[in-house]
Image (spheres, helix red, strand yellow):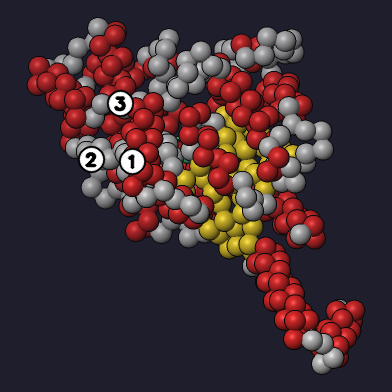
């Protein structure tokens, strides 16, 4: 501080003896110094985190947990905004079961309900993510032709504005009727025996809570909000204030063909939060059914961690869905994804191996903090977020010193 004061005094003294050009140069230099000071101050107070990873890995759920612990905690008027998404999730679960009933040769009890199921399926088809991505890309190309974006802020705004998935809100009475049918119940009871196209954990949850959700006085609970499956197709930016530091979280789509957009968000990022869906070890990507989803995630992590634009950026690796991972290991092994794995079929050993694969794929000097998580578990995430926030504060201090 003393040194700084001395430097300023010296400059003031010498300015009086300078030529016009010299004074202008000093003024320019001061203005640059001032801008740099402001920039440094802004950086110290604001931290930008890029949240990336495979589709359905838990990125948006993580943001919801941040909102719960450090944001507005979902007041009632905000909870109501999720109702349409929840009803859509229930409808998707029902249509999913109707499709399985057909495969199993199960008939609805009466011709009226049979007709209703046909109508319902027509109105609420299960739209594949591949179709949505195609629509999203077309919209984006059209917009780019009309008005190309030049800044990141414009790109963020545009990518968050497309409404490619806007289905009709399902009728709750129809859903009650379909759910109450005995054949539908038999099909649901047999859900664990589905060989392919299994019901997701979130669909199962919403179907089990259908009575509450379809009631007149329904207000979404935190758990309902955390369980919603609604893929992010563009980019969503969320801001949180924690201990005087502004966190700008950028949540981007995880689909393979939308990853090219990630690079636009590398600039000014303090840390990258990379999400891995642990249960993906025996699944294949929707966009290319020949590619194993966990291998795909590993490859994306290797590529991103080697990016020259992120060479000084620390990573936080979230090995997520550990609850579902533990369940899945009871019937299958990670050797499906990693044929070299010869370890026991336990959670600890399998998790350790997967973590090692990720850490071995990054550059040696890259700092990566890793956590095994369950993003829908509120108390667990409360503790974990406190650790993550401390870690980000350290990263930010380190970064500001290097600036
Ligand atoms: N059981 C369980 N479900 C989870 C966990 N994390 C996320 N989910 C659920 O998985 C689904 C997908 O989570 P999202 O947060 O939407 O995934 P995403 O990474 O944002 O996916 P994209 O937007 O498609 O890239 C949602 O239904 C979540 O409720 C977890 O740890 N355990
Ligand atoms: Mg998302």
Q: Residue at x 37, y 14 (%)?
A: 190
Q: Position of residue 7 (x, y in %)?
A: 87, 81
Q: Relative to the observer, which residue lies in front, 127 or 281?
A: 127
Q: Residue at x 71, y 46 (%)?
A: 313
Between the residue at mark 3 and the residue at mark 2, the CA separation in whole angstroms equals 14 Å
Between the residue at mark 1 and the residue at mark 3, the CA separation in whole angstroms equals 26 Å
Q: Position of residue 112 (x, y in %)?
A: 9, 21
Query: Which residue is the site of mark 3?
Result: 126
Q: Is residue 166 above or below residue 161?
A: above
Query: Which residue is the site of mark 1?
Result: 142
Which label sits in the foreground, 1 or 3? 1
Query: Which residue is the site of mark 2?
Result: 169
Q: Is mark 2 within 8 Å of ligand 1?
A: no
Q: Is mark 1 within 8 Å of ligand 1?
A: no
24 relative position to 48: left or right:
right
Q: Residue 176's mark?
A: none
Element marked by disc 1: helix
Q: Are marks 2 and 1 in contact (CB under 8 Å)?
A: no
Between the residue at mark 2 and the residue at mark 1, the CA separation in whole angstroms equals 28 Å
Callout 1: 10 Å neighbours few (<14), some, many (20+)?
few
Residue 267 in sight from this viewpoint: yes
Q: Position of residue 86 (x, y in %)?
A: 34, 40
Q: Relative to the observer, which residue lies in front, 187 or 356?
A: 356
Residue 34 in sight from this viewpoint: no
Element marked by disc 3: loop
Q: Are marks 1 and 3 in contact (CB under 8 Å)?
A: no
Which numbered disc flags the more N-terminal residue, 1 or 3?
3
Q: Relative to the observer, which residue lies in front, 352 or 107?
A: 352
Quadrant of the snapshot with the N terminus: bottom right
Quadrant of the snapshot with the C terminus: bottom right
């Amino acid at each position: 501080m003393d040194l700084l004061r001395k430097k300023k005094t010296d400059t003031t003294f010498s300015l009086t003896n300078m030529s016009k050009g010299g004074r202008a140069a000093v003024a320019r230099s001061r203005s640059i110094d001032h801008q740099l000071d402001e920039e440094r101050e802004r950086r110290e107070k604001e931290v930008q985190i890029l949240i990336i990873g495979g589709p359905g890995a838990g990125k948006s759920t993580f943001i919801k947990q941040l909102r719960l612990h450090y944001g507005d905690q979902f007041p009632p008027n905000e909870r109501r905004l999720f109702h349409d998404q929840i009803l859509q999730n229930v409808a998707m679960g029902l249509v999913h079961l109707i499709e399985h009933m057909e495969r199993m040769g199960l008939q609805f009890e009466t011709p009226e309900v049979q007709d209703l199921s046909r109508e319902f399926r027509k109105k609420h088809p299960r739209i594949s993510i591949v179709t949505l991505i195609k629509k999203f890309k077309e919209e984006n190309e059209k917009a780019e032709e009309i008005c190309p974006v030049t800044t990141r802020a414009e790109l963020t705004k545009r990518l968050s504005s497309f409404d490619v998935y806007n289905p009709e809100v399902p009728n709750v009475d129809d859903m009650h009727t379909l759910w109450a049918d005995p054949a539908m119940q038999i099909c649901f009871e047999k859900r664990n025996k589905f060989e392919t196209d299994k019901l997701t954990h979130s669909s199962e949850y919403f179907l089990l809570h259908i009575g509450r959700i379809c009631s007149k006085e329904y207000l979404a609970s935190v758990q309902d909000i955390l369980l919603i499956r609604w893929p992010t197709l563009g980019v969503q930016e969320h801001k949180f204030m924690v201990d005087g530091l502004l966190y700008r979280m950028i949540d981007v789509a995880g689909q393979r063909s939308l990853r090219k957009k990630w690079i636009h968000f590398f600039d000014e990022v303090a840390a990258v939060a990379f999400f891995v869906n642990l249960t993906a070890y025996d699944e294949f990507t929707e966009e290319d059914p020949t590619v194993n989803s966990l291998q795909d995630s590993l490859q994306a992590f290797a590529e991103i961690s080697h990016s020259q634009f992120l060479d000084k950026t620390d990573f936080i690796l979230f090995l997520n869905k550990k609850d579902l991972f533990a369940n899945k290991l009871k019937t299958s092994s990670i050797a499906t994804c990693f044929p070299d794995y010869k370890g026991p079929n336990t959670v600890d050993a399998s998790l350790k191996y997967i973590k090692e694969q990720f850490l071995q794929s990054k550059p040696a000097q890259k700092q990566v903090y890793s956590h095994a998580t369950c993003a829908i578990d509120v108390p667990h995430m409360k503790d974990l977020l406190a650790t993550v926030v401390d870690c980000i504060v350290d990263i930010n201090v380190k970064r500001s010193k290097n600036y």
